[in-house]
Amino acid sequence: MEIFSKVIVLFLLGAGFMACKENVNKQNEHPNIIMIYLDDLGYGDLSCYGATELQTPNIDALAKGGVRFTNGYASSATCTPSRYALLTGTYPWRNKDAKILPGTAPLLIRTDQETLPKMLKNVGYQTAVIGKWHLGLGTGKVNWNQRVSPGPNEVGFDHAYIMAATQDRVPTVYLENGLVDGLDESDPIEVDYSNNFKGQPTGKDNPELCEMMWHHGHNSSIINGIPRIGYMKGGESARWNDTDMADHFLNKVKAFLQEPKDKPFFLYYAMQQPHVPRTPHPRFVGKSGKGPRGDVILEADWCIGELMKTLEENKLLENTLIIFSSDNGPVLNDGYCDSAVEKLGMHKPAGPLRGGKYSLYEAGARVPFITFWKNTIKPAVSDALICQMDIMASVANLVDGKMTPTDSQELLEVLLGKSKQGRESLIIEATSRTALRYGDYMLIPPYEGDSVNELVNIELGNASNYQLYNLRMDIGQHENLANEEPEMLKELIDKFIEVRGEDYAEISKLDLK
């Protein structure tokens, strides 16, 4: 009887151990997910995408060990719309307010809207955003001296450490879960995008105070010797140090990763490089030979190397899916005189592509796109058509998350390198203009306006007639096939109107010559 009792006790203990082990496995059965998102990084800015005058070994290691996509797209050729699509799985042109936002814009994402972090939270993920936000905050009139809400926390992020908009816009402060980090209540922040505050110097009126000279559009309040967009007064103790920004965000990322966790996590690491103003840490100044723009790309590559070391040290690497991309294509002179053009040399930020940021041509929205998951994703190069917008539906499939249908397409097998059957078509957007990628072809409808943005020296894609390109045969978009392939042109126009709706039906009546 005593032996039987001992057997029963051992059986129960064993069952209890197995149950605990099963619970632990259930907690860890879903991978951690990190989205690394750069800002204005071009298709040709990385050595793994063909750059020869810039070496990016840490990003190259992701590409070498994962899937490097050659047809990976942001949804837009500008930042706010792409970020909106990434987090909501919805085409930005469906939201009329999804445009480049000023620093005082209200929150663009509705608090009742489905988002990637909300979906992940619902299946047990811990969620965090660290870095650039630029999706609006509050309801339109922000008091920066109180908790700013709604914001990232209200659309699914448990933790948010962000800059409000962009590095070139005021207010030049960090916010942690809606509160300005380091604010002295006796020195309140005031922000105005229309009128300056009495006695405050500006880049326009006081160029002698500028350590970085403005070229266009960046001539308001001078903070840390850099003229910004918008006017700001107060908040001296809370103002960021521009040259420390990359380190600052990286340290916040490391701290988040090193926190004890009993659940998987989703980290949206939204880096500021190589957006203007380009302010590399002294460790990187002059390192690229390409001026500050090249230097901050090398700085970003180093940060990613440090991220990977932290994951490895904390035994997180083998259970973490990493997705790397950029919000839009490259731009050189985007408001400051920082020698980006003069020191370019033989480097081609767009690689073989035409256009750049703000453009409907390929370099506007076709961007570096890499997935990495140690020992799960096999190294490959994929020409599958995929968009950042598709991450939401694909990740939902990975973690058994629930979401209502959106524009996001479920392409998990493509993300993991198990399939090369990507999208059939994609609408891309650039400053309220849209175009259609369908198979190997790109259709750009006629648009009025300048063909080139003279300030940034980028072709915008505007023309009086249709443009049709076979991207497999002509990646640089040199030969317009609209007249040579009228049947294909008509087919794509019909498909474009089918997606864009009746508002675009009138374009089919335009002269096809």
Image: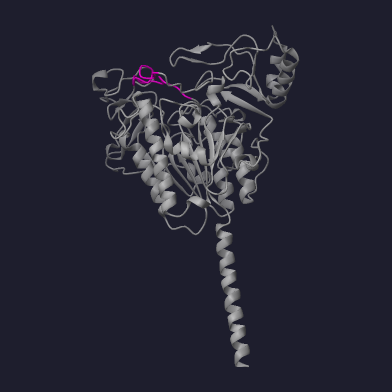
Q: Would residue 420 be visible to someone looking at this image?
A: yes
Magenta segment includes 340: yes
* Residue nearer the viewer, 457 or 231: 457
Instruction: Find the residue positioned furthest to the bottom.
Output: 1
Q: Pinpoint residue 394: horizontal percent, then vertical percent.
A: 62, 42
Identify the residue at horizontal 53%, vertical 23% (top origin).
364
| Scheme of image coloration | one colour
Relative vertical location of residue 447 with respect to residue 308 in this rendering, above or below: above
Q: Pinpoint residue 180: horizontal percent, then vertical percent.
A: 36, 42
The majority secondary structure of the magenta stretch comes to loop
Q: Which residues are magenta?
A: 330-345
From the viewer's perspective, is 91 left or right of 226?
A: right
Q: Pinpoint residue 16: horizontal percent, then vertical percent.
A: 58, 74
Give residue 488's quadrant in the image.
top right
Q: Pinpoint residue 136: horizontal percent, then vertical percent.
A: 48, 35
* Residue nearer the viewer, 304 or 62: 62
The quarter in which the N terminus is drawn is bottom right
Q: Would residue 137 be visible to someone looking at this image?
A: no
The quarter in which the C terminus is drawn is top right
From the viewer's perspective, is 280 left or right of 404?
A: left
From the viewer's perspective, is 225 left or right of 381?
A: left
Identify the residue at horizontal 43%, vertical 54% (top origin).
314
Give residue 442's quadrant in the image.
top right
* Residue nearer the viewer, 142 or 280: 280
Relative vertical location of residue 52 with respect to residue 369 in this rendering, above or below: above
Instruction: Find the residue positioned furthest to the top.
Output: 513
* Residue nearer the viewer, 198 or 423: 423
Give residue 206's quadrant in the image.
top left
Magenta segment includes 268: no
In this figure, what is the number of numbered marks? 0
Instruction: Find the residue positioned furthest to the left.
Output: 208
